[in-house]
Image (cartoon, rainbow, N blue to C red):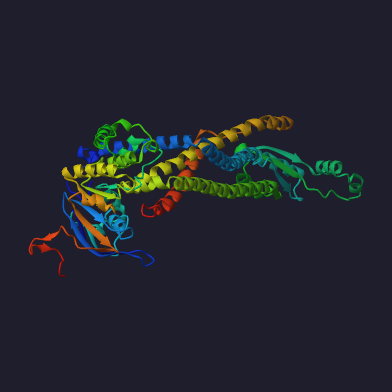
Amino acid sequence: MIKFDQVSKTYPGGHRALEKVSFELGKGELAFLTGHSGAGKSTLLKLISLMERPSAGKVSINDVDLNHISNRQVPFVRRDIGIIFQNHRLLERYNVFDNVALPLVIEGTHRKHITKRVHAALDKVGLLDKIKCQPSTLSGGEQQRVGIARAIVNSPPLLLADEPTGNLDPELSMEILTLFEDFNRHGTSVLIATHDLGLIARMKYRSLTLEHGRMLQDPLAIDPLKGDYLGGHS
Amino acid sequence: MSLLFKGRGNQANSQEKSTFLKLYFFVLTLFRHGVHSLGEMWRTPMASLMTILVLGLSLTLPTTLYVVVKNVQKVSSGFQEAAEISLFVKESISEQETQTLVTRLGLYPEVESVSFISQAQALDEFKQISGFGQALNYLEENPLPSVVLVTPTKRHRGADSAQALLEKLEQEREVEFGKLDIEWLERLNALLGLLKESVFTVGVLLLSAVVLIIGNTIRLSIMDKKEEIQVLKLVGATNTFIHTPFLWTGIWYGIVGGLVAFICVTLMLWWLESAVSLVVGVYQSSFVLEGLDLSELMLLLLLAISLGFIGSYLSVRKYIREIEPEKV
């Protein structure tokens, strides 16, 4: 689904955010992306959602090289990716329904379908009863779930989450992760950036670790030829 | 339309749509955006009202100047006519020959009437008007020529055609030279030209001001919605989608500003009407102050809409591009 091939990113000013990062996330896979703040997690997500372009190397999604995507095509790529933010980024001027409906409105979906899908998405995150509320009247966990509903309302094949549990207590975090697992079971590839190591430990998913812009060994990735850990000796 | 995942249709595309239907939805969306942005303006009534008034007044000034030029032109068109051509008869021509000239000139199709002022009559008139009466008595002979006054027909009173007629009349054997008093007419025309020119210049300046005002208003509105634009870009909105509401706002400002200008001009004319009728009464003429007619109103609105569109387009192009999700 996502493939990084020797990707480096240097920001103007010389800060090296990523250095020769290579990894692959399979179709329908769920993986965590961990590392200290400043390790390059956000940059990596930004490269996938085309908020940034790599300085070197190749990022591809579903075998489409993102270097070949022009700026005009960027919006259409983003429609295939559901993005969830730590600060949920809801529009305060609109109510929950309008916020969740946003990706569908942009695609020009028919009103009838919008209503149906927004209801389905809100039902999935358990907030159907808050459909007419303003985001500011909701709790932190609820706002985060509205953000998730917005990310999944058009059933994207790929979900990216940037510290989705950052501001939540462990119980709520677990709840959110269960949601992700649920989407994953329905075939969506999910990549979750988080520094909440306790959370990761409790779940048996692959985790990719970044340190100072480099990808560390991937303990769960086993080289099928050697029957050994990948990159152990190289 | 999915670039990455072939076969992944969204709701909009999963239903087979004909070109006609697509166009219909396009227009519908455009219209919805229009109504929506009108609602947005309604949300901040004070700010919108002030912008609209500034725009209205900026448009009122050039419109008023236009109306002034139009009315002055109408008044002066009454002066555009050369009423008389004076033909000075050669000294050697006898009185009788002059009479035949008068009869002959009367037969010209371009001539309405001809009158003759003999040397003696001319002298009498001059004595009366000039006040040199006594002095003139000392002259041994009458220095004044006989004059034939020719009044052209209505069709030949225009500056150019009267000039042409004059040249034709000067060909007559008995005529020394002719004179057509159109100098003042040329001066008036030059003055009018100057007025038009200055109206044009002032107009261009004020209309550029309109573009700048709308551009700035839209810029502020973009800055205000920065976060919203970022989120829209993140969930995959195209630039067109983000631009449209702002362009609509510019267009609405243009429409309403144009209407305000129209109302201002109409009120002003209504107020001036009584003053004008007073002046007209003194001159015993039948002048009616003319306002903007329907086609001129449409032109004003069209101009205002274009200016609104240009102003907002400039802002939208420059500032929305700068707002990118990563620059948080």
A152 relative to B259 in the view: left or right: left
Q: Position of residue B8 (x, y in %)?
A: 19, 45
Q: Position of residue A95 (x, y in %)?
A: 37, 35
Q: Reply above or below: A15 against B293.
A: below
Q: How many marks?
A: 0
Q: Position of residue A79 (x, y in %)?
A: 27, 46
Is residue B224 in view from this perspective? yes
Residue at image position (59%, 33%) is B266
Q: Quadrant of residue B326?
A: bottom left
B70 relative to B103 in the view: left or right: left
Looking at this view, name the residue that lies furthest to the bottom: A234
A134 relative to A177 in the view: left or right: right
Q: Position of residue B223 (x, y in %)?
A: 46, 48
Residue at image position (75%, 44%) is B147
B71 or B175: nearer the eye? B71
A106 or A3: nearer the eye? A3
Q: Reply above or below: B33 against A77.
A: above
Q: Quadrant of residue A37?
A: bottom left
A23 relative to B61 in the view: left or right: left
Is residue A105 in view from this perspective? no
